[in-house]
Amino acid sequence: MMIEVKDLWKSFDGEPAVRGLNLTVRAGSVHGLLGLNGAGKTTTVKCVVGLLRPDRGHVRVAGRSATEDVSYKSLIGYLPENPSLPEYLTVREFLVFVARLKGLGGRELQTSVSEVAELFGLNGLLDKLIFGLSKGLKQRVAFASAIVNDPLILVLDEPFNGLDPEVQSVAKAEMKEISKRGGSVLVSTHLLDTIERVCNSATIVHRGKDLASGSLEELKRSAGLDSSASLEEAFLRTVSRVRE
Ligand SMILES: Nc1ncnc2c1ncn2[C@@H]1O[C@H](COP(=O)(O)OP(=O)(O)OP(=O)(O)O)[C@@H](O)[C@H]1O
Ligand SMILES: [Mg+2]
């Protein structure tokens, strides 16, 4: 298991945002984290990447405990929900900076930076300041930086924010590629049509709990639908059942 979350609890000012959530992401899979606004997706993701400390429960990434052994952080790539990029750096400077932090150097570093720049159509922008880039171009830079070290574990929080269709397709291909190499991708998103074509499995989060988890087929079946139904239908039905 590449990512394992068991009975995760996290409160803010005494108000629980995540209440006993369970989640597993296997090697070789792209796993969706689906939920309404405020469901607890970002809080869960932040516990997985080690930005937040769980109140209770455990998080294991690549076999290491997220609270006891932070060495796993060098293995992962992370795209935050609202990435804040250093606007005073050029695109190249930022990508080189992140690559160095991830332990790359020399020719390997240059090759990695060129590859991600090429992939995300940033070649013509490498010497431009991040300050002057549009929202979607900044998101491309953030995505490129998340995969510059070729991570086997990739955690994405609303990765499609502002990306045009061409780059969304690049992003999806990259997620699939990582899973084909035996890696794991955990992706939080509202774009159910988009993610349905990429992920193998998903967890539906509602009010801080995992309502349903499994392959897309299993999610549809447990919502009482057959395989011709869409993930969106399965999601809406699963969530509305709790409201009743
Ligand atoms: N830093 C914080 N301080 C106080 N409350 C917070 C904080 N971060 C999250 N929360 C609360 O925790 C709950 C879950 O928020 P979270 O950001 O995890 O939801 P989400 O599923 O990512 O939502 P969205 O789809 O809008 O991104 C919400 O009620 C939110 O207001
Ligand atoms: Mg969020």
Image (cartoon, rainbow, N blue to C red):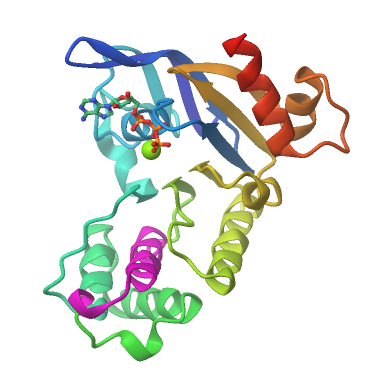
Q: Image height check: is 105 above or below 85?
A: below
Residue 93 position within the rendered picture, expressed as x and y whole percent measured from the top left: 20, 77
Depth order, front residue of 202/106: 202
Which residue occupies the extreme left position in the image? 88
Instruction: State which quarter of the image contains the N terminus.
Output: top right
Q: Is residue 29 left or right of residue 70?
A: right
Q: Quadrant of residue 184?
A: top right
Q: Is residue 137 magenta?
A: yes
Instruction: Decide if residue 197 is on the left or right side of residue 40.
Output: right
| Farthest residue, direction bottom | 124
184 shown above or below 39: below
Q: Residue at x 75, y 20 (%)?
A: 223
Give the number of marks.
Answer: 0
Of 207 and 149, nearer the camera is: 207
Q: Which residues are magenta?
A: 130-149
Could you say which quadrant of the image residue 32 lies in?
top right
In-image side of 158 versus 86 (left or right): right
Q: Residue at x 45, y 34 (%)?
A: 62
Picture quarter with the C terminus: top right
Name the residue located 66 percent from the left edge and 44 percent from the top edge.
199
Ligand 2 resides in the quarter of the picture at top left
Q: In the figure, residue 72 lies in which quadrant?
A: top left
Give x and y (percent) for residue 174.
57, 62
